[in-house]
Image (cartoon, grey):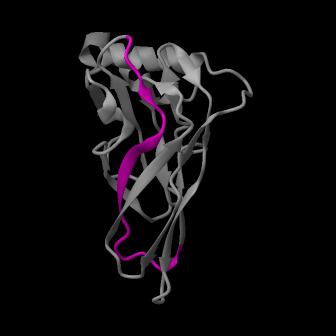
Amino acid sequence: MHAMKMILPCFSAALPSLTSCPNTAVNLRILLLSLAVPAAVPSAIVVDPGVVRVALGTSSVQIPVSITGGDALTDFAGLVEVGNPPSAGPLITAVSYTGSIWENAAGGYLSFFTGSPPAATIGPNISLNAAGQSVAGSGVLLTLTVTIAGLPAGDYPVRFIHTAGGDSVLANGASIVPASFGQGIIRILDDAIL
Protein backbone atom coordinates (compact mmCIF):
# COMPACT_ATOMS: atom_id res chain seq x y z
CA MET A 1 0.00 0.00 0.00
CA HIS A 2 2.93 2.33 0.64
CA ALA A 3 4.00 2.20 -3.00
CA MET A 4 0.78 4.09 -3.77
CA LYS A 5 2.27 7.17 -2.12
CA MET A 6 5.14 7.01 -4.60
CA ILE A 7 2.96 6.95 -7.69
CA LEU A 8 -0.14 8.87 -6.68
CA PRO A 9 1.15 12.06 -8.36
CA CYS A 10 0.74 10.17 -11.65
CA PHE A 11 -2.94 9.61 -10.91
CA SER A 12 -3.71 13.05 -9.54
CA ALA A 13 -6.89 14.79 -10.66
CA ALA A 14 -4.67 17.73 -11.61
CA LEU A 15 -3.24 15.71 -14.50
CA PRO A 16 -5.29 15.65 -17.69
CA SER A 17 -4.63 11.96 -18.38
CA LEU A 18 -2.45 9.01 -17.45
CA THR A 19 -0.48 9.54 -20.66
CA SER A 20 1.01 12.72 -19.24
CA CYS A 21 2.84 10.69 -16.59
CA PRO A 22 6.04 8.87 -17.60
CA ASN A 23 6.23 5.12 -16.98
CA THR A 24 2.47 4.83 -16.40
CA ALA A 25 2.34 1.10 -17.21
CA VAL A 26 5.19 0.35 -14.81
CA ASN A 27 3.66 2.59 -12.12
CA LEU A 28 0.31 0.86 -12.48
CA ARG A 29 2.01 -2.53 -12.16
CA ILE A 30 3.81 -1.40 -8.98
CA LEU A 31 0.53 -0.02 -7.60
CA LEU A 32 -1.21 -3.36 -8.17
CA LEU A 33 1.72 -5.19 -6.56
CA SER A 34 1.59 -2.96 -3.50
CA LEU A 35 -2.10 -3.67 -2.99
CA ALA A 36 -1.37 -7.40 -2.89
CA VAL A 37 1.04 -7.20 0.07
CA PRO A 38 0.21 -10.09 2.41
CA ALA A 39 0.07 -9.61 6.17
CA ALA A 40 2.92 -11.27 8.09
CA VAL A 41 4.76 -13.76 5.90
CA PRO A 42 8.18 -15.17 6.75
CA SER A 43 10.84 -13.78 4.46
CA ALA A 44 13.70 -15.54 2.72
CA ILE A 45 15.08 -12.39 1.10
CA VAL A 46 17.23 -10.12 3.29
CA VAL A 47 18.24 -6.63 2.15
CA ASP A 48 21.11 -5.15 4.17
CA PRO A 49 22.72 -1.72 3.72
CA GLY A 50 25.28 -2.64 6.41
CA VAL A 51 27.39 -0.32 8.52
CA VAL A 52 29.76 2.02 6.67
CA ARG A 53 32.48 3.66 8.75
CA VAL A 54 34.11 6.85 7.47
CA ALA A 55 36.41 9.50 8.89
CA LEU A 56 35.13 12.93 9.84
CA GLY A 57 35.63 15.28 6.91
CA THR A 58 34.76 12.67 4.26
CA SER A 59 32.63 14.31 1.55
CA SER A 60 30.69 11.30 0.23
CA VAL A 61 30.37 7.57 0.61
CA GLN A 62 29.18 4.71 -1.59
CA ILE A 63 26.96 2.10 0.02
CA PRO A 64 26.57 -1.22 -1.81
CA VAL A 65 23.28 -2.67 -0.54
CA SER A 66 23.41 -6.47 -0.35
CA ILE A 67 20.55 -8.85 -0.99
CA THR A 68 20.53 -12.53 -0.04
CA GLY A 69 18.01 -15.34 -0.28
CA GLY A 70 18.05 -16.05 -4.00
CA ASP A 71 14.30 -15.72 -4.70
CA ALA A 72 13.31 -14.79 -8.26
CA LEU A 73 12.67 -11.04 -8.69
CA THR A 74 11.26 -8.89 -11.50
CA ASP A 75 10.60 -5.56 -9.75
CA PHE A 76 11.73 -3.28 -6.95
CA ALA A 77 9.52 -0.42 -5.76
CA GLY A 78 12.01 1.29 -3.49
CA LEU A 79 11.91 3.94 -0.82
CA VAL A 80 15.27 4.80 0.67
CA GLU A 81 15.97 7.35 3.37
CA VAL A 82 19.20 8.51 4.99
CA GLY A 83 19.51 10.47 8.21
CA ASN A 84 16.45 11.78 10.01
CA PRO A 85 14.58 14.14 7.65
CA PRO A 86 13.56 16.91 7.84
CA SER A 87 16.67 17.55 9.98
CA ALA A 88 19.77 18.57 8.03
CA GLY A 89 21.86 15.51 7.31
CA PRO A 90 23.09 13.22 4.56
CA LEU A 91 21.64 13.37 1.05
CA ILE A 92 21.43 10.57 -1.50
CA THR A 93 23.04 11.99 -4.66
CA ALA A 94 23.02 8.92 -6.93
CA VAL A 95 21.83 5.33 -7.30
CA SER A 96 23.79 2.88 -9.45
CA TYR A 97 22.81 -0.56 -10.69
CA THR A 98 26.30 -1.31 -12.05
CA GLY A 99 27.34 -4.72 -10.74
CA SER A 100 23.83 -5.33 -9.36
CA ILE A 101 21.55 -8.35 -9.69
CA TRP A 102 19.51 -6.41 -12.28
CA GLU A 103 22.37 -6.58 -14.78
CA ASN A 104 21.80 -10.36 -14.98
CA ALA A 105 18.55 -9.80 -16.91
CA ALA A 106 19.27 -10.62 -20.56
CA GLY A 107 16.34 -8.43 -21.64
CA GLY A 108 17.58 -5.46 -19.62
CA TYR A 109 15.74 -3.34 -17.09
CA LEU A 110 14.05 0.02 -16.71
CA SER A 111 15.03 2.20 -13.76
CA PHE A 112 13.18 5.35 -12.76
CA PHE A 113 12.59 7.52 -9.71
CA THR A 114 9.69 8.81 -7.68
CA GLY A 115 11.47 11.55 -5.80
CA SER A 116 14.89 11.79 -7.42
CA PRO A 117 18.29 12.67 -5.96
CA PRO A 118 19.67 14.70 -4.36
CA ALA A 119 17.35 14.18 -1.42
CA ALA A 120 17.24 12.47 1.97
CA THR A 121 14.31 10.28 0.82
CA ILE A 122 14.15 8.91 -2.73
CA GLY A 123 12.20 6.25 -4.60
CA PRO A 124 14.47 4.19 -6.85
CA ASN A 125 12.33 1.78 -8.87
CA ILE A 126 13.31 -0.95 -11.27
CA SER A 127 11.42 -3.31 -13.53
CA LEU A 128 12.70 -5.97 -15.92
CA ASN A 129 11.95 -5.34 -19.59
CA ALA A 130 11.32 -8.91 -20.78
CA ALA A 131 8.16 -10.76 -19.75
CA GLY A 132 8.78 -14.12 -18.12
CA GLN A 133 12.31 -13.19 -17.09
CA SER A 134 13.58 -12.82 -13.51
CA VAL A 135 16.84 -12.39 -11.62
CA ALA A 136 18.01 -14.19 -8.48
CA GLY A 137 17.85 -12.04 -5.34
CA SER A 138 21.43 -12.66 -4.31
CA GLY A 139 24.26 -10.13 -4.67
CA VAL A 140 24.09 -6.33 -4.80
CA LEU A 141 20.60 -4.79 -5.02
CA LEU A 142 21.93 -1.30 -5.79
CA THR A 143 24.66 1.12 -4.74
CA LEU A 144 23.84 4.45 -3.11
CA THR A 145 26.10 7.49 -3.24
CA VAL A 146 25.50 9.70 -0.21
CA THR A 147 26.98 13.13 0.48
CA ILE A 148 28.03 13.64 4.09
CA ALA A 149 30.18 16.77 3.66
CA GLY A 150 30.22 19.00 6.73
CA LEU A 151 28.29 16.59 8.96
CA PRO A 152 29.43 16.08 12.56
CA ALA A 153 30.59 12.71 13.89
CA GLY A 154 27.73 10.35 14.66
CA ASP A 155 25.47 7.62 13.29
CA TYR A 156 23.12 8.32 10.39
CA PRO A 157 20.53 5.62 9.56
CA VAL A 158 19.94 4.16 6.08
CA ARG A 159 16.38 2.80 5.81
CA PHE A 160 14.34 0.93 3.21
CA ILE A 161 11.28 0.65 5.45
CA HIS A 162 9.65 3.06 7.89
CA THR A 163 10.69 5.99 5.67
CA ALA A 164 8.76 9.24 5.35
CA GLY A 165 7.24 7.81 2.14
CA GLY A 166 6.53 4.25 3.30
CA ASP A 167 8.24 0.90 2.71
CA SER A 168 10.16 -0.73 -0.12
CA VAL A 169 8.66 -3.74 -1.95
CA LEU A 170 10.22 -6.54 -4.03
CA ALA A 171 8.14 -8.55 -6.49
CA ASN A 172 8.18 -11.45 -8.90
CA GLY A 173 5.60 -10.66 -11.57
CA ALA A 174 2.30 -9.97 -9.81
CA SER A 175 3.44 -11.51 -6.51
CA ILE A 176 5.08 -9.64 -3.66
CA VAL A 177 8.26 -11.38 -2.52
CA PRO A 178 8.46 -11.32 1.29
CA ALA A 179 11.64 -9.55 2.35
CA SER A 180 13.35 -8.42 5.51
CA PHE A 181 14.87 -4.95 5.09
CA GLY A 182 17.65 -4.21 7.56
CA GLN A 183 18.58 -0.71 8.73
CA GLY A 184 22.06 0.40 7.77
CA ILE A 185 24.25 3.02 9.38
CA ILE A 186 26.67 5.62 8.08
CA ARG A 187 29.02 6.04 11.04
CA ILE A 188 31.14 9.20 10.88
CA LEU A 189 34.07 8.89 13.27
CA ASP A 190 36.13 11.80 14.59
CA ASP A 191 39.21 9.67 15.20
CA ALA A 192 41.40 7.44 13.05
CA ILE A 193 39.73 4.20 14.20
CA LEU A 194 37.53 3.04 11.37
Instruction: Tell me the quarter of the image containing the N terminus.
Output: top right
Q: Give the residue at x 49% y 25%.
A: 72
Up-down relation of residue 77 to residue 27 (above or below): below
Q: Is residue 181 left or right of residue 88?
A: right
Give percent across and percent down for residue 156: 52, 65
Give percent across and percent down for residue 67: 50, 43
Give percent across and percent down for residue 134: 41, 22
Q: Nearer the viewer, residue 171 or 93?
A: 171
Toward the bottom, the furthest residue is 191
Residue 19 visible in the picture:
yes
Q: Nearer the viewer, residue 193 or 6?
A: 193
Q: Give the residue at x 31% y 45%.
A: 99
Toward the right, the furthest residue is 40
Q: Nearer the viewer, residue 126 or 10?
A: 126
Magenta part of the chain: 132-154
Q: Give the residue at x 53% y 58%.
A: 50
Residue 114 visible in the picture:
no
Q: Quadrant of residue 140?
A: top left
Up-down relation of residue 25 to residue 102 (above or below): above
Q: Is residue 139 magenta?
A: yes
Q: Give the residue at x 68% y 21%.
A: 38
Q: Is residue 90 left or right of residue 85?
A: left
Q: Is residue 82 left or right of residue 147?
A: right
Q: Quadrant of residue 13?
A: top left
Give percent across and percent down for residue 177: 57, 25
Up-down relation of residue 115 to residue 37 (above or below): below
Q: How many marks?
A: 0
Q: Is residue 85 magenta?
A: no
